Structures are given as C-alpha cells and as structure tokens.
Image (spheres, grey):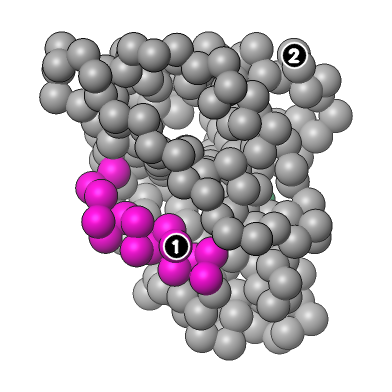
Amino acid sequence: MDIKLYKFLNNTNTKTPKNVLIVGVIHGDEPIGEFLIEKYLKNKTKTLNNNLYFIPRLNFSNKRKNKNNVDINRNFPCKNWELSTFDDDYFGGFKPNSEKETQFIVNLAENIKFDAIITIHTPYKIINFDGANNQNTLPLAKKISEFLNYPIQEDIGYPTPGSMGTYFGIERNIPIITIECDENAEPEALYEKFANLFNYIEKDF
Ligand SMILES: [Zn+2]
C-alpha cells in the first residue's frame, strides 16, 4: 500500500501560515489515528489559516512493527539510534532510516519546514512531547491536553532511541507532540474531541 499525504494549504491570507504535519498509525496495531484523520478529512471545513499535511496511515501492517519487522518509531536517523535484536518489540531496523515509512517522513520534512508535528498513538491516555527547548512546544501540548482531556507527560518513562520525537523534537527543535489515545475510547466520542483539535490547528494555532 502507498502512503497517502493530504495537503490543505492556507486560503485566507490573514496571517503567515504555519506548517503542521499530523500522522496516524505509525504502529500498525494502533489504527485509531487513521479513523480520526479520515473522518476529519471527509468533514473538514474549507477555511484554513495554516497549511496542514495529513498522513492517515503510515504503517500498513496490522502489528506494531512494519512488514519488515521494524518499529518505525525506532528507525529515525537520530544520534541515539541503536541496533537491537530482530525479535525485540522495538527493533529499529538493521540501519537507521532503512524503512520506506521513515524515509517518507524524513524526506517530507526536508522539503517542508514544519512548525509542529502531531502523531496519534494508543494506549497510554497521555500527551507526550519532546524538545522542551522550543518555546512553542509546551503551549501546544497544553492546548492538545485541553481538547483531549489527557494529562501531559514529558518523559514517557523509557528510552526511545531512534524515535520520531527525538529526531524532530530534540535534534531538530521542531515541536512534536505524541498523542496517546485511550484504546477503549468510543471512536465517535473521541472523534468529536479531535475534530475540535484539528479545527483549532487549522484556524487558530
Ligand atoms: Zn504507538
């Protein structure tokens, strides 16, 4: 399956648009992000003050890792990338940036200077962020926390070498927020919260 990217560009000229990337299903067994983004794209409003880039589904396998058995969220070419064993749940590939999913994001971010990146995971019911040095990161995390009613947690509690958060948030100073949804949440109820969040990102962020 091909990774799909949907672009919606500023059409109001009311301000200098920000570029925001929103990514679902980095882990194949966390499908809620695809549902939330696809539903939003069907219903979305037409007025945009910002430039939004949506990837509903990055990983088309139905398990955590991709079809090559690699955890995309450990495959980013970070300084702290490390080789782990193949059967590890968090196996980050034999080389950093070896996977087409990782390359897709890395290449996209080389072409577009993102002001913020939001990723949608399950199941921890928290808002996690990397790169607290960027003064825009915490305010965005707080906003997202308000919309979704999950607490903010800066450190997820275990090391994440080669993660997207490290690559963008720590090494490139781009605010990156990881939303960890409740996997037992009623999808439609969760969608209502995400629709408000995405509307905010489109218009007011
Ligand atoms: Zn995940």
Residue hosting label 1: 104
| Residue 65 left/right relative to 161 | right
Q: Quadrant of residue 37?
A: top right
Residue 18: x %, y % from top left = 24, 30
Seen at 51% across and 85% down, the residue is 95
Looking at the image, tell me whether mark 1 or mark 2 is earlier in sequence order. 1
* Magenta range: 100-114
Residue 126: x %, y % from top left = 63, 33
Q: Does the magenta stretch include residue 103?
A: yes
As displayed, is residue 80 above or below residue 64? below
Label 2 packing within 10 angstroms: few (<14), some (14-19), many (20+): few
Q: What residue type is labelled 2?
A: Ala
Asked whether residue 145 is in view, the answer is no
Q: Which mark is residue 189?
A: 2
Q: Quadrant of residue 15?
A: top left
Q: Which mark is residue 27?
A: none
Q: Which amino acid does label 1 sit on?
A: Phe
